[in-house]
Amino acid sequence: MYLVESKGGAILCMVVALLFLGTWPALLTLLERRGRLPQHTYLDYTLTNLLAALIIALTFGQMGSETPNFLSQLPQENWSSVLFAMAGGVVLSLGNLATQYAWALVGLSVTEVVSSSITVVIGTTLNYYLDDKINKAAVLFPGVGCFLIAVCLGSVVHASNAADNDKKLNGFSCNSNRTALNPSSSVSVEAHKNSVGNKDLENGIASVEKAKFGTALFLIELENKRSIKVLGKGTMIGLGITLFSGICFSLFSPAFNLATNDQWRTLKDGVPHLSVYTAFFYFSLSCFFLAIVLNVVFLYRPVLNGPKSSFKAYLSDWNGRGWALLAGLLCGFGNGLQFMGGQAAGYAAADAVQALPLVSTFWGVLLFGEYRRSSRRTYAFLFGMIFMFVVAVAVLMASAGHRK
């Protein structure tokens, strides 16, 4: 049973998925910049992410009189397809966990563009062949090439913006006659707390809002408030994490494709293919369990020299919990809609939802002041990156086919 069968319905699913998947990273980034530990945020997020999959399975997955539906498929001998779905959930969970730290290190915009572009270059190619080439290759692969160009431009944008920030911080040091926090030096953030009047930035006495977006003072105050300290860490660390997340993201959609369409003929004769709703439930279940295990470990053994926490501290941390829960719902429903569109029009075309950096960049500039007061060189590369991304998305959607 499948509800979205027309090409128009599939495109509508992709557009809504694009909005949802481009917004939830901004909510998690906002909480990190306010000082909430990413472990706490992700534990909240993963709860509602699974809840969204369960809601989809028990509503869309049970609609209509056709079989099999969600509940009837649970006892079937379909474990080979279930394992493919769960493998997709594992790599997605690893990718999402990695991007939490990449957002802090290289910014929301660059992280989303680079990881999404890698996803399209690898994932779309795999899905094209898995879907028996139902998408138009002459249109599809030029779009993939545009995504690849966007990856290169994204890396250049980050390097240029990092150089701009270095210049601002060094200039701030000279003007104030105080020790500046140079990302290439070992000077601590505490030295910069003194340069803003010894005010307690952690407790909000000196607000980021008092400094203009893009200024050196803004960067210093932001560093003092956020939960992941980024100044002083090398550019390659953030780009390396982004690359890892992109590779993980490139594999989850092909794995889901195999789970729902059984291209490798692993199911026994007479056993129906998993519906997209059943597969999405198993997909989200494995994503949930891995995220819980890893983030509980990270509470006590944090990465990137973050502060330690505990499960008790997580339970009592209600600051921003509502936003984290909302982010989980947006991501869950966004992924579900992406898979519904892919099952109808081909998963290669559904990778057009990887245009989510267009939405994320909007939030990055509007909410977080990314690229404010940057150089003309940075702006030129930024607009070039966005332009190539828009072209790539348009071309990719134009390649949509129709699954028989």
Image: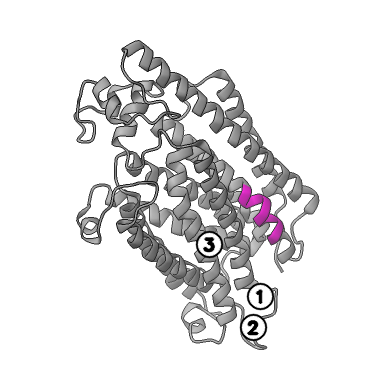
* Quadrant position of residue 365: top left
The residue shown at (55%, 82%) is: 79
Numbered circle sitting on residue 175: none
**Above or below, comparing residue 205 to residue 150 in the picture:** above
User: Picture coordinates of residue 5 (x, y %)?
Assistant: 62, 65
In primary-sequence order, the first of circles 3 and 2 is 3
In primary-sequence order, the first of circles 1 and 3 is 3
Mark 3, Cα crowd under 10 Å, few <14 / some 14-19 / many 20+, is: many
Labels 2 and 1 touching (C-beta < 8 A): yes
Q: Secondary structure at mark 2?
A: loop
Comparing labels 3 and 2, the label whose residue is closer to the camera:
3
Q: Tell me where the magenta segment starts and ends, as one range.
A: 118-127
The residue shown at (59%, 54%) is: 247
Q: Which residue is mark 1?
A: 262
* Image quadrant where one finds the C terminus: bottom right
Q: Secondary structure at mark 1?
A: loop
Direction from residue 58 to residue 139 in the image, left or right = right
Q: CA distance from mark 3 to mark 2?
A: 23 Å
The residue shown at (38%, 45%) is: 27
Q: Which residue is mark 3?
A: 91
Q: CA distance from mark 1 to mark 3?
A: 19 Å
Mark 2, Cα crowd under 10 Å, few <14 / some 14-19 / many 20+, is: some
Labels 1 and 3 touching (C-beta < 8 A): no
